[in-house]
Amino acid sequence: MIPVLPPLAEIDRNVAATIDEDVGAGDLTAQLIAADRVGHARIVSREAAVLCGTAWFERSFAAVDRGVSVRWNARDGEHVAAGDVLCEITGPARALLTGERTALNFLQLLSGVATRTREFVDAVAGTRARIVDTRKTLPGLRRAQKYAVACGGGDNHRLGLHDAILIKENHIAAAGGITPALRAAQNVAAQAGERCQFIQVEVENLDELREALDAGATMILLDNMTLAMMREAVALTAERAILEASGNVSLATVAAIAATGVDRISIGALTKDVRALDLSMRFID
């Protein structure tokens, strides 16, 4: 999918909250530097990665001082190599020092998500399976992380509870079964109109899959099924519904899951188990 940058107002809210917790009443250490000192710095990647988060990086420095300028050598979604200079920054030295940690945190986190996503996407290359994210995101950073997933070549699932219906095990139990849950979901979706992008139902075995198909499900989540069960589910469904595999997916298992013929593989680890990209900022003079 084509990455769509979140609105700048939302990026600025992310940045403002982070600046507030880090800078608070003011950066005491930055006051060691003369107020009129101009600084020049470079951001260098210490490892190969997929870059993401340039807007958050720029807005972090802008929130400290609008006199800071950033010149990029790469764009979101592009591969960078170890040792590459990602950008050069110029502005008041105090501002560079004050904004450094916040700006790097965003760039490291979002590049980490994009890089991890690209690893999974590459692992299923040549199959029909698409890599999909989940709602297992860091609090307050859902749009940012979903943007990073898209930059890594993955697809976004629903943004939240407000734009699609995913009927899970507890919904099924509370509604009295898969069939009544799907019927109720169809009514809710009709009332919601365009706001409801899709209806998806979770199944744990082939009997539940048959019931979901008989009830008219067009998107089905296969929860923690074995590879053999997934292959049987694909054959049973015969392309009557989109099948999404989920549960305990890793780089070691994702290729085998994709080979079963499922359409999508959702992976919570893309956004909840993030290893930040190793970056460094160094003053040039």
Image: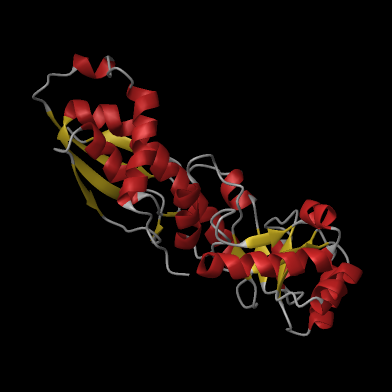
Q: Which residue is drawn at 16% across and 38% down?
A: 66
Is 11 on the left or on the right of 258, as rendered?
Answer: left
The one nearer the camera, 6 or 67, is 6
Q: Where is residue 225 in the image (x, y as percent from the top left)?
A: 83, 63
Q: Position of residue 132 (x, y in %)?
A: 60, 62
Q: Residue at x 28, y 34 (%)?
A: 282
Q: In this view, does 71 lie above or below 255?
A: above
Q: Position of residue 158 (x, y in %)?
A: 57, 60
Q: Which residue lies furthest to the left in this view?
A: 36
Q: In which quarter of the image is the C terminus?
A: top left
Q: Position of residue 115 (x, y in %)?
A: 50, 55
Query: Which quadrant of the view contains residue 31?
Result: top left
The one nearer the camera, 7 or 263, is 7
Query: Which quadrant of the view contains residue 88?
Result: top left
The one nearer the camera, 171 or 236, is 171
Is 257 on the left or on the right of 137, as rendered?
Answer: right
The answer to whether residue 255 shows anywhere in this view is no
Is 129 on the left or on the right of 176, as rendered?
Answer: left
The answer to whether residue 151 shows anywhere in this view is yes
Q: Is residue 131 above or below residue 267?
A: below
Q: Which residue lies furthest to the right in this view?
A: 207
Q: Which residue is drawn at 21% across and 41% down?
A: 89
